[in-house]
């Protein structure tokens, strides 16, 4: 890398949580290979079948609660501390709705597709932590309306979150890294082209080349639990894990 790396923008996708036992979406056996997203992950689906949608997300929450963060999540938590210690910073943007980055110790995580462990009122927009006993007639803690609490995730056809902060962080980065994402869904899949246009070095860390692999300056292919700790050790000049 031509210039000292102090500000790193990392985009993560489902692949970083795969070795924690959470399925990805488009790999063989992936979530969208087993379930129809148009029936479970759109505002229209929720309006049509709220109980089915709630049941689907409760199933996913169960999987997340049984999962543990892996070495890749832990490495990014170390990277956040290491970059801050040298006066830089990590902007960790995830497409994932699980909380494994936070449970691994990451302090600042931007969930551009929302968070599975939160719900949101369709009447007033207030968000609240998901609770076991949440049901269709649960009242919104903010406005009191019953029957309108939905998963606080971004569905197909909805606008991803925090795009202004993401754009600012991307423009200010010294390095853009994509980890565990297929590059199939925009706007996240377009971040690498934005980084390139700004002259920012780009790196892909993935099990296999993504749909946007050709746009990256560098790439490491292999399981995230091996490739991400190696990448972080290299960036922080640490001894490579044995
Ligand atoms: N280590 C690293 N990468 C992995 C691993 C692993 N152990 N296992 C799988 N991968 C890679 C796959 O090669 C694939 O490129 O993770 C990627 C997963 O791709 P997708 O299933 O498409 O998931 P993602 O890119 O996160 O999807 C983006 O699509 O449906 C929406 O909202 C959903 O956030 C999601 C978005």
Image (cartoon, grey):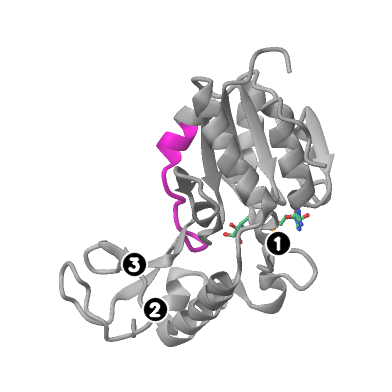
Q: Residue sitting at 51 percent across and 57 percent down?
A: 103
**Position in image of residue 201 (x %, y %):** 69, 23
Residue 155 belongs to magenta span: yes
Residue 195 is tagged as none
Q: Is residue 89 left or right of residue 175?
A: left
Q: Is residue 50 above or below residue 222?
A: below
**Residue 54, above or below 22:** below
Quarter that holds the C terminus: top right
Q: Quadrant of residue 121?
A: bottom left
- Residue 31 on image: x %, y %: 67, 72
Which span of residues is magenta-colored?
A: 154-167
Question: Which residue position is annotated with label 3?
Answer: 129
Q: Residue furthest top?
A: 3
Residue at 48% from the left image edge and 29% from the top image edge:
169
User: Where does ligand 1 appear, by image quarter?
Assistant: bottom right
Q: Nearer the viewer, mark 1 or mark 2?
A: 1
Describe residue 150's horizontal placement relative to residue 182 as left or right: left
- SS assignment at label 3: strand
How packed mark 1 is, by other alpha carbons closer than 10 Å (few <14, some 14-19, many 20 or more), is some
Residue shown at 22%/81% (left/top)? Answer: 146
* Res 18 label: 1
**Residue 142 colored magenta?**
no
Place of residue 9 in the rendered image (x, y in percent of width and height, measured from the top left): 57, 33
Q: Quadrant of residue 122?
A: bottom left
Q: Is mark 1 within 8 Å of ligand 1?
A: yes
Please name the residue that numbered disc 2 is placed on.
Answer: 47
Q: Is residue 92 left or right of residue 235?
A: left
Regarding mark 2 in the picture, which secondary structure is present there?
helix
Disc on the earlier residue, 3 or 1 = 1
Nearest to the eye among marks 2 and 3: give it: 3
């Amino acid at each position: 890398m031509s210039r000292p790396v102090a500000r790193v923008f990392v985009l993560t996708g489902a692949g970083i949580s795969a070795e924690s036992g959470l399925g990805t979406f488009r790999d063989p056996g992936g979530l969208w290979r087993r379930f129809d997203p148009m029936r479970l992950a759109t505002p229209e689906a929720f309006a049509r079948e709220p109980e089915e949608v709630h049941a689907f997300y409760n199933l996913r929450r169960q999987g997340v609660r049984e999962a543990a963060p892996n070495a890749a999540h832990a490495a990014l938590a170390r990277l956040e501390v290491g970059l801050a210690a040298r006066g830089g910073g990590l902007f960790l943007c995830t497409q994932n709705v699980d909380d494994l980055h936070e449970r691994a110790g990451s302090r600042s995580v931007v969930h551009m597709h929302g968070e599975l462990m939160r719900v949101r009122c369709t009447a007033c927009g207030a968000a609240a932590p998901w609770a076991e006993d949440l049901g269709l007639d649960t009242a919104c803690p903010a406005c009191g309306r019953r029957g309108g609490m939905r998963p606080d995730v971004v569905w197909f056809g909805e606008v991803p979150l925090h795009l202004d902060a993401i754009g600012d962080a991307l423009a200010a980065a010294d390095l853009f890294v994509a980890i565990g994402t297929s590059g199939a869904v925009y706007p996240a899949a377009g971040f690498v082209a934005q980084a390139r246009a700004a002259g920012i070095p780009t790196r892909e860390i993935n099990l296999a080349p993504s749909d946007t692999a050709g746009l990256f300056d560098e790439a490491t292919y292999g399981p995230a639990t091996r490739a991400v700790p190696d990448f972080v050790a290299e960036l922080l000049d640490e001894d490579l894990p044995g």
